[in-house]
Image (cartoon, helix red, strand yellow):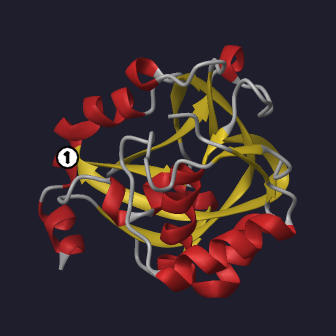
Amino acid sequence: MPIKKILDNPDQWVAYFGYGSLVNDRTRNLESFGLSGRLKGFRRQWRMRSGYGDTGQPGNEGVTALSVDRDDNAYCDGLLVFDHKDHLPQVDKREANYDRLSLDLADFDCNFDIPAGVEAYIYIGQPHYTHWAEGAFPVLQSYIDAVMQGFLDKFGHAGLERFISETDGWRVPILQDRHNPIYPRPVLLNASEEQLFDQLLQKVGGQPVALVT
């Protein structure tokens, strides 16, 4: 049981709250594991910008991903990920342009006993990079696929719909890169997942944008 590993050596572990792609086990290192739960005091939003790096698309400046904003009246489903402390620099690199802030686990509600003595964090977009998605900074379909698959796996269909309803800014341009993914940690979907995710995005007003290859 992974929890026992932490109880035996709590100083060797760290926790961070995943509310987007980190919820999907397929996007993280294999030694990490998570506890599903609900965090009070944060609202999820489509407003974290970053550059394409070496996979840029002509005519676009970058992409938009998920971040959270503090809101005392809000709740946010997600995964409290436990990971080896020496992996934290790799996670910081993955979450470039986010600030890693201390997290009070008293605000995290789950059906498990959380091991004591483990440092916990949450990644929040730095103000300079926090802007709503628009044409020059679309959302990648491959990123949305990874996020939605993670929420479907961990929280079921009802949890996936709750993820959508508790996230602001869904009327975004969505770059159709599912079959030629730009997101560096793409996942494979089955036919039913593709159909479900596309139906949900259409319902909330996502705006498909063709991928230029």
**Who is closer to the viewer here, 149 or 59?**
59
Q: Which residue is mark 1?
A: 11
Q: Is residue 196 above or below residue 73?
A: below
- At horizontal 13% and vertical 56% (from top left) the residue drawn is 9
- At horizontal 19% and vertical 59% (from top left) the residue drawn is 30
Residue lying farthest to the top in this orientation: 128
**Who is closer to the viewer here, 203 or 132?**
203
Q: Locate the N terminus and report the quarter of the image it occupies.
A: bottom left
- In the image, 211: left or right of 90? right
- At horizontal 27% and vertical 29% (from top left) the residue drawn is 89
- At horizontal 65% and vertical 21% (from top left) the residue drawn is 60
Percent x, y for residue 93? 35, 27
Percent x, y for residue 163? 70, 67
- In the image, 53: left or right of 49? left
**Who is closer to the viewer here, 68 or 41?**
68
Number of marks drawn: 1
Q: Is residue 114 above or below residue 130?
A: below
Q: Is residue 32 above or below residue 188?
A: above
Percent x, y for residue 143? 53, 50
Dot 1 crowding, Cα within 10 Å, few <14, some 14–19, many 20+: few
- Report which quarter residue 126 is drawn in: top right
- Report which quarter residue 201 is drawn in: bottom right
Instruction: Kindly state the secondary structure of the residue where label 1 is placed.
Output: helix
Percent x, y for residue 159? 66, 79
Amino acid under disc 1: Asp
